[in-house]
Image (cartoon, coloured by chain):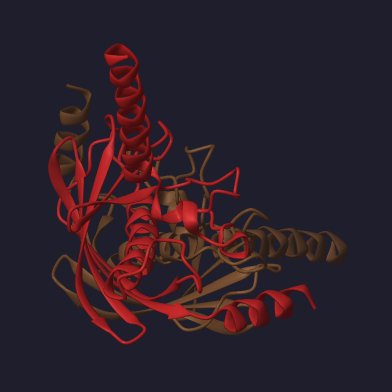
Chain colours: A brown, B red
Amino acid sequence: MLSRNINSLLLVFQIFNNTTVMSQHKAFQDYYPDNFNHCYGCGGLNEHGHQLKSHWEGDIAVAKFEPKPYHTSLPGYVYGGLIASLIDCHSTGTAAAALYRAEGRELGSEPPFRCVTASLNVKYLRPCPLKGTLELKATVKEIDGKRVTILVDLYGVGEICAKGEVVAVAVGEKWVKRWIEGAAE
Amino acid sequence: MLSRNINSLLLVFQIFNNTTVMSQHKAFQDYYPDNFNHCYGCGGLNEHGHQLKSHWEGDIAVAKFEPKPYHTSLPGYVYGGLIASLIDCHSTGTAAAALYRAEGRELGSEPPFRCVTASLNVKYLRPCPLKGTLELKATVKEIDGKRVTILVDLYGVGEICAKGEVVAVAVGEKWVKRWIEGAAE
């Protein structure tokens, strides 16, 4: 009887533990609605793209990315356009996640938050080594209604190589549908 | 005799005309030194990359680019990271070309000008249709020693979709060699 109770307890613990681990690792982008999930930088439905994944670690949004050997600027260093792209997509994802947090809502709860980029500023501090994994760390600078300002530090081999500031704006389902239908005309 | 002279004249005219057309179409990036020509955005030696080409039309530097069908943000629209990348590479190329012009020198004359990006700012004005060719038009805002500020308008289907401002900095051969050798260590 004692053994059965311990086994049940262990089972409950395992389920709880797996759920926690899964929810820690499910990315902001995994909650994007399908019609918002084709972005070359971060859309899970874009098989050609970077499929960037971002998640919270406390109040910092973190993403990691492994550049391809051909993502070069100078030989041996990462192409600045890729750095800008990663900062952009990490920021729009973080902006959406920040809006859920600000309303005390679970990621992916209805209605969904989707953010597009109004402006992207990148300062390149030094050439970024094309070795191993790039790491992006973002914080929320400001939420002003639908406008969210995100600050991003991008690291290569543990050293900060670029700083970004992105203003992202939340857009509604009607806005998204109108543009998508407009493109199909 | 008259006929032979006319033929010679026609030949000279054809050679002159072809040279003019070729020099109009040889891009800024075609003059990059080999060790600066591997950029994913604009390096002629990067077979995986965009190979952006920029050239002068009067005082405006122009580049055109055909995005792939998978370079999407919203379905039917161009991925913002690609827009940022094109603005970046078009600007560094234009900055180098502007430095040659400011010194009254031919593109590609020695010593070569090579520019890297110090900062990149992009304002996204509207979703950019993923139809046909994107066009970039750049002007030189300021040359301050080695720092060149470039303004770029990016057009999709004839409509302005994004505006960029890039500060590019000219770097010397020693700087380039030092970084490339550092990466190989």
Query: Residue A20's spot in the image, x, y percent?
Result: 59, 65
The mark total stands at 0
- Relative placement, left or right, of A44 versus A169 is right
Query: Residue B89's spot in the image, x, y percent?
Result: 40, 59
Name the residue: 23% across, 71% down.
Answer: A148
Query: Residue A50's spot in the image, x, y percent?
Result: 53, 50
Name the residue: 70% across, 69% down.
Answer: A131
Name the residue: 42% across, 48% down.
Answer: B52
Name the residue: 70% across, 65% down.
Answer: A13
Front residue of B139 and B84:
B139
Q: Is residue A118 visible?
A: yes
The C terminus of chain A lies in which quarter of the figure?
A: top left
Query: Residue B66's spot in the image, x, y percent?
Result: 36, 35
Front residue of A56 and B63:
B63
Q: Quadrant of residue A81?
A: bottom left
Q: Is residue A157 visible?
A: no
In the displayed image of the protein, which residue is found farthest to the right?
A3
The N terminus of chain A lies in which quarter of the figure?
A: bottom right
Front residue of B90 and B104:
B104
- Relative placement, left or right, of B6 versus B118 is left
In the displayed image of the protein, which residue is found farthest to the front?
B1
Determine whether A40 is above or below B4 in the image.
Answer: below
Q: Quadrant of residue A85?
A: bottom left
